[in-house]
Amino acid sequence: MNSELVVNFDYKNIQQVRMIIPVMVVLWFLVDSIQEPCLSFLPIIVIKFVIISCLVLLSLGSIYYFVLTRKNEPAAVLNNDGIWIIHHGFISWENISDICMHQALGAPLPIVAVNVRDPKAISAQSSFGGKCVLFWSKLFGYPHIFLANIDIENELVISFSKRYITSKNSV
């Protein structure tokens, strides 16, 4: 029985984020070409603001993934004491309420969802990126922390975690 599981990112999958660049170019041309309201109930400034906001979010997400692929850190390391997750640090099994599969609306693949008992404590130890993930997760009702674009099967991570969560929570 392995006492440690290292979960790396699937870099080939993450590199496909480059395909977002044509979408950003099209959005930029939309901002530049809108002269009269295409939706009569919305002013042009509102439409341009929405499109520019989408551009900013797509750009920040692309930069985040570009930086992420340049690091040689694993996405997570699981052992008998707990789980270390990039941007969130170490979380003991006692602070994890559940690890399960989660299928986000419109997402092509399920992800590993980590629900913690005390999100404020995790937020305090998280990096800025981790704090943003926790904020958006709370805002949209998603699991607290998630592992996506990993190089091993989601079921392997969940089954490895479940034996520690059940043993630590039953004590």
Image: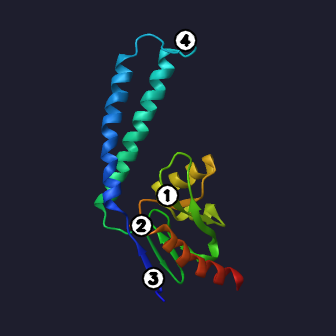
Query: Which dot marks residue 75?
Result: 2
> Residue under circle 4?
40
Instruction: Name the secondary structure under disc 3.
Output: strand
Report how far apart the C-alphas of labels 3 and 1 lie in the structure.
Answer: 23 Å
Q: List x then y, in percent, for residue 168.
A: 65, 82
- Please say if the residues under marks 4 and 1 sit with CB atoms less than 8 Å apart: no
Q: List x then y, in percent, for residue 152.
A: 41, 69
Q: Disc 4 marks which amino acid?
A: Ser
Using the rendered view, name the quadrant where residue 32 is placed.
top left
- Pointer 1 or 2: first along the chain: 2
**Residue at 49% across / 67% down in the picture?**
154
Report how far apart the C-alphas of labels 3 and 2 lie in the structure.
Answer: 14 Å
- Please say if the residues under marks 3 and 1 sit with CB atoms less than 8 Å apart: no
Q: Disc 2 marks which amino acid?
A: Ala
Instruction: Name the secondary structure under disc 2.
Output: loop
Whether residue 28 is situated above or below residue 4 in the rendered picture = above
Q: How many marks?
A: 4
Query: Which dot marks residue 4?
Result: 3
- Pointer 4 or 1: first along the chain: 4
**Residue at 48% across / 21% down in the picture?**
47
Query: Which dot marks residue 89?
Result: none
- Quadrant of the image containing the C terminus: bottom right
Say which of 36 and 82 sits in front: 36
Q: Disc 1 marks which amino acid?
A: Gly
Q: Residues within 10 Å of mark 3 (few under 14, many from 20)?
A: some
**Residue at 48% across / 12% down in the picture?**
37
Q: List x then y, in percent, for residue 42.
A: 55, 16
